[in-house]
Image (spheres, helix red, strand yellow):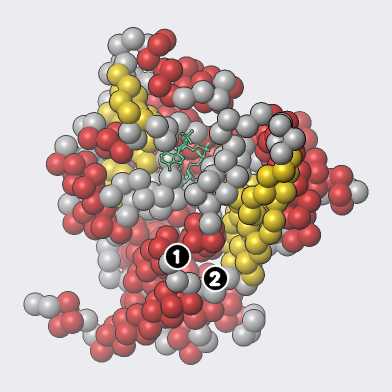
Amino acid sequence: MSILQTMSQEEVNARDYVQDVYETVVKRNPHESEFHQAIKEILESLIPVIAKHPKYKEHGILERIVEPERLISFRVPWVDDQGIVRVNRGFRVQFNSAIGPFKGGLRFHPSVNASIIKFLGFEQIFKNSLTGQPIGGGKGGSDFDPKGKSDGEIMRFTQSFMTELFKYIGPDTDVPAGDIGVGAREIGYMFGQYKRIRGGNEAGVLTGKGIVYGGSLARTEATGYGTVYFVNEMLKSKGLSFEGSTVVVSGSGNVAIYAIQKATQLGAKVVACSDSNGYVYDKNGINLETVQRLKEVERKRLSEYVKEHPDAIYSEGCQNIWTIPCDIALPCATQNEIDETSAKILVSNGVQAIGEGANMPSTLDAIDVFLKAGVLFGPAKAANAGGVAVSALEMSQNSMRYSWSFHEVDDKLHQIMKNIYRNSVNAAEEYGHPGNLVVGANIAGFLKVADSMIAQGVI
Ligand code: NDP
Ligand code: 2IT
């Protein structure tokens, strides 16, 4: 039976409408493949919602939600250690403020462009809604490459970046945080510059700050821990657990490090991790202390790991990490790092669960492979929402001028991840796709934002 025969007339109409919206996005944003990909995934998930509730079409919700409220692009001039003037491009997309101030990280990586920032900002709308906290969707960054830069260069760049960005952000309007290439050091320099320009201490303007000047305990750990908490819920639904499992984690940055730590605490053996040059396989289990020191303190390449652990094997090229047999795969590096071929290899090696720590790490074809094979699949906007959820807790603590203990924050994070899992499962069930957390997370995230947009009129 063809798909058309299994669809009601309302669903056929909804599908055609969604297709029209998608085509308009592609036409209006040419050559932005990552942005198209994120839009396509969401819109297709929403077909049963549009079919069931005509109000979303009547209020033009889809046409409005795919268009950012504002996209800011700016020049970032700075002087390198040789005295040469360098220029990068900065971005901030303020995508949707229906449920709260814009919230989302800043990414510094040479691949950053409007497409990357818009896909991330669009995803952030639904992720932030899923957390249950009052935060809208935003994202920003620059094509600046932090690799090989001195501390002074990083400071001059971030100060110049903030000298422009400060005009558009604030504790009640838009609250940036970290992402790839932006960690505690960069947030510290940006916070200092913002405070200097504004002439006041608005602690809640940025999250991911150092603990002694307004940061939240457990924010550093939150994304990686949250991903593992989410995957644990998926595993429990099938009577499985991390205990005794073999895990592969891609990346070796903030998200990867704390995913490795929590998975290990729950009894898993994490046998591999990677950076953009290659991956390490350690049959004894990855030594996290070594990875943290190499990547966070010494800012070296992961290839150095094998000098200290001669039993481990380093291979050039990060893609082949997915050929390592594992029970659980946690992609925690970057977008589209698992393609259809890698997904098929993972499935044929018997993978049971995927938890997306990174944003959009699986291509649409890869997701299809996982879902068809019946692999437990935790999509990014649900599985990695723990980072932004604890950022919102940081904002709350800043407003209260008070700090919670590590355990208080970690307990709240754990509960938030369980709620996201439950709400995604329920939405998938209610809209006719039981067990499909891609559809479930997209719908659960969408409904609150869409209803708020209707309540607030055509803006
Ligand atoms: P980091 O900069 O701390 O680490 C990024 C890691 O991914 C590094 O190991 C890096 O390797 C690797 N990497 C980056 N680009 C590529 C690439 N093109 N190919 C292969 N590997 C790559 O970033 P985070 O850990 O913060 O972010 C990782 C992912 O998690 C991103 O998708 C981010 O958007 C997402 N995320 C982050 C959150 C957070 O709170 N930080 C919250 C939610 C999602 P190398 O050192 O060689 O560059
Ligand atoms: O992708 C993400 O959710 C983040 N990079 C974290 C955003 C935040 O505001 O903490």
- Mark 1 — residue? 32
Q: How far apart are marks 1 and 2 (CA)?
A: 24 Å
- Left or right of 375, for residue 89: right
What residue did someone put label 2 on? 449
Mark 2 residue crowding within 10 angstroms, few (<14) / some (14–19) / many (20+):
many
Residue 13, quarter of picture: bottom left
Location of the N terminus by quadrant is: bottom left
What's the residue type where badge 2 is placed? Answer: Val
* Residue closest to the eye, 151 or 22: 151
Given residues 35 and 82, the one toward you in this image is 82
Q: Is residue 153 left or right of residue 120?
A: right
Image x and y of residue 115, in percent: 49, 61
Q: Farthest right residue? A: 199
The image shows residue 435, relative to residue 337, as above or below, that is below
Q: In this view, does 67 lie above or below 13?
A: above
**Residue 271, image x and y in percent?**
31, 25
Asked whether residue 33 is in view, the answer is yes
**Local SS, label 1:** loop
